[in-house]
Image (cartoon, rainbow, N blue to C red):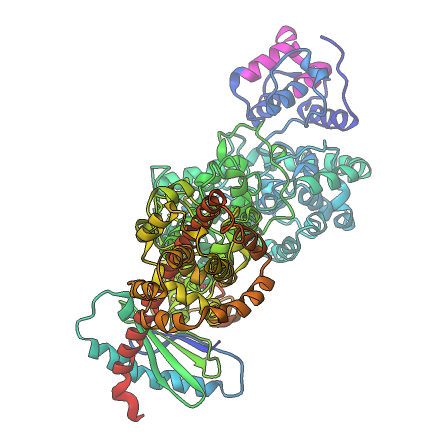
Amino acid sequence: MEGLTLSDAEQKYYSDLFSYCDIESTKKVAANGRVLELFRAAQLPNDVVLQIMELCGATRLGYFGRSQFYIALKLVAVAQSGFPLRVESINTVKDLPLPRFVASKNEQESRHAASYSSDSENQGSYSGVIPPPPGRGQVKKGSISHDPVQPRASADQQEPASPVVSPQQSPPTSPHTWRKHNRHPSGGNSERPLAGAGPFWSPFGETQSGSSTGDAVWSGHSPPPPQENWVSFADTPPTSTLLTMHPASVQDQTTVRTVASATTANEIRRQSSSYDDPWKITDEQRQYYINQFKTIQPDLNGFIPGSAAKEFFTKSKLPILELSHIWELSDFDKDGALTLDEFCAAFHLVVARKNGYDLPEKLPESLMPKLIDLEDSADVGDQPGEVGYSGSPAEAPPSKSPSMPSLNQTWPELNQSSEDTAIVHPVPIRMTPSKIHMQEMELKRTSSDHTNPTSPLLVKTSDLSEENKINSSVKFASGNTVADGYSSSDSFTSDPEQIGNSVTRQRSHSGTSPDNTAPPPPPPRPQPSHSRSSSLDMNRTFSVTTGQQQAGVVAQPPAVPPRPQPSQAPGPVVHRPVDADGLITHTSTSPQQIPEQPNFADFSQFEVFAASNVNEEQDDEAEKHPEVLSVEKASDPASSLRVAKTDSKIEEKTAASAPANVSKGTTPLAPPPKPVRRRLKSEDELRPEIDEHTQKTGVLAAVLASQPSIPRSVGKDKKAIQASIRRNKETNTVLARLNSELQQQLKDVLEERISLEVQLEQLRPFSHL
Amino acid sequence: MAVCVAVIAKENYPLYIRSVPTESELQFHYMVHTSLDVVDEKVSAMGKALVDQRELYLGLLYPTEDYKVYGYVTNSKVKFVMVVDSSNAALRDNEIRSMFRKLHNSYTDVMCNPFYTPGDRIQSRCACACRGGPAGRGSCSESK
């Protein structure tokens, strides 16, 4: 057997254990009796124990000498940490936690456990405090360790000053967490004051208060009767043995304690800082909770109905108000039933409360039930114990990331943070959602609790999470969707409520809101033709006659674009929020566009004329045409539909006389009288306004540049005309969308009006009041 | 902004009533009490109560000089009454509806708690937060 190197802590610990086992002081321990109990307390499977014994050579010798005992203990630690048992592992495994021995083994061990008690301060406080209600079988795993408490207990008995020391007392312990489930000493520990617990858990304000109250609580309790119901995780020693041990170990405790106190203060502090989560459920506790759950509901995936849970928790003799609060905290999905996770959380809270800890305002992270879609993504707050609560002692809290500061993270926060990692696939964004669509998107978003990169329209709503905003800002960067957001801002004023409603609706569905499945696919786009992005489907635009296209364009909130440059049709669109106001201004500022209206419907003519090279003929009119065009471009896209007609108009002008245009004015698109009337406005008027418009947008420059070329040559004319045709078509579609959007708004307003009228009718009887 | 929120049980006694702390809180209590008559009138006027969201929301019960009183009744004849300040012109009907919806959700959460027996008073932890915010948008978490 190779030499065994032990750290100081280990050395002390092992020596203590050895002296404990070595009752006869023969420097060798028989392979039975206390040693066996010790090993059994280590909660290792029997074959592992046998293996350990074999490895350390005890089998060979027939007894445990000191060295064998030490080796055995080290191997126990190795096994508990999950490492394979090998002879070499004794020395190779670094920073091995001290072997844990459950149940009580010793006051000594409990001492040591003081430093171990990382995660389960509350456990420590449990020890035996609560007299078990008959048949309640609540486990207060008290245990545990109140490691600081236990030494203190003895300290109390012997050294009144010990509580002061207690936090440091630190029995020599490894920095790793220790779940010292030392429930059994509870018999002697019940008088332990919790004073020491306070400073130990200084990070937790509530625990401090809890500890103080727990102190009172404890003092009020007589030593709890042997908690046959309570200590579930023992596979061992009845309390009696522990109690017998107690007096014997007391002196040892004191000695050890004094030794320990000097050494491991740092260790304890380090431990506490890294593993302090008073709400963590240890494996043993969890196992116990699960067993209790089974007594009520054999199916671990099933629910415990509220009534059964009420009976169960009423047995804990907590006031109803507190039980109600606990229920409120633990029933995560608000469905009136407890799942296994919820039940464990509730049980844990009851235990904590009984031990004097105040209930938190919000559910601590470690108690939050595992949400389905957060399983692998959330590294914060999910209990690792939940995953594998096989009870293997190796699965220690050290594996869990310390989540101390975020104890009280709220669930939505948790969701958000985890969802960032849990976003499985990008959800295609509907760039030009209609109002309905936006609601759908919002519904999906809230239902899935994903911060999907949904429409930037959501940015406008106050309910949006930041994620959405980020996403939407990204969208803005893309420059495509802002227009949608702006354009739909008006229509969505009433949407926040609906969206909020969708959120609340989701919430009210039992069990559905936490179930974050993959985000549902976005609804099919109402327009299969193209999205509202800047990349207008130009091909479609060209292929289809403008008239048809206009019919096809539906329900896309167009940002009323300023007259775009020929190259970038909706580019400038982004920055022109289309409001009703905008429309009005547009319409007001550009009355001259209206004359173009008559030509709207004349797409067929437009096409015809496009083919022709008529423009070259009338120079003067052509001059005006560019002006008209520029004017129209200056005008807002509200009139882009009309603008679209400018080219046609130009050609009409070229081809036909003014009266012909007037006749075309009777197109179905625009109110005929208006255009006719405006049409009478001489084009001379357009001229001065043209200058204004040219000043307004720099876009005009390009337009104008193209325009003058029209009369120059036939070839250039054709290209220019075609380019202008394209532009006009774009603006046409944009305006069509705007039109549909506004009509929807109109419908909504009308509905509201109707509802208001109905209400008025209802209130009419009360008008006399 | 809601200045007073009340949850009235089926037998017309209050389960929960909270007001913005003013000197005339009693006035709000009286307003809620008198509004119960209006609620009953509306409910009876509706005839067969269809389970419809619209009919749960009763709308403006009656306006007074300074305040408006809105009502909402659940299927179990539990009434929610909300008094809002008339000066808040921006409050729309939809907002009131959403407020009531949230209130209803919170109420159902309380009901779901097995430790709450129907008919008991409701103790809310965040009484102020519940009603705060424009149109009461803050989430309301009641607890028994």
Find the magenta span and give its range.
A48-73
Could you tell me residue A395's position as x and y percent? 57, 29
Q: Nearer the viewer, residue A644 or A336?
A: A644
* Quarter placement of the C terminus of chain A: bottom left
* Quarter placement of the N terminus of chain A: top right
Residue situated furthest right in the rendering: A262
Q: Which of A752 and A626 is in front in this view?
A: A626
In this picture, is A748 found above or below A515? below
- What number of labels is visible? 0
Q: Is residue A320 magenta?
A: no
Could you tell me residue A345's position as x and y percent? 48, 46
In this picture, is A471 found above or below A23? below
Q: Does the magenta stretch include residue A50?
A: yes
Q: Is the magenta stretch mostly helix, strand or loop?
A: helix
Q: Which of A581 and A403 is in front in this view?
A: A581
Could you tell me residue A484's position as x and y percent? 47, 55
Tell me if residue A130 can be seen: no
Could you tell me residue A608's position as x and y percent? 33, 48
Residue situated furthest left in the rendering: B48
Left or right of A436 in this view: A371? right
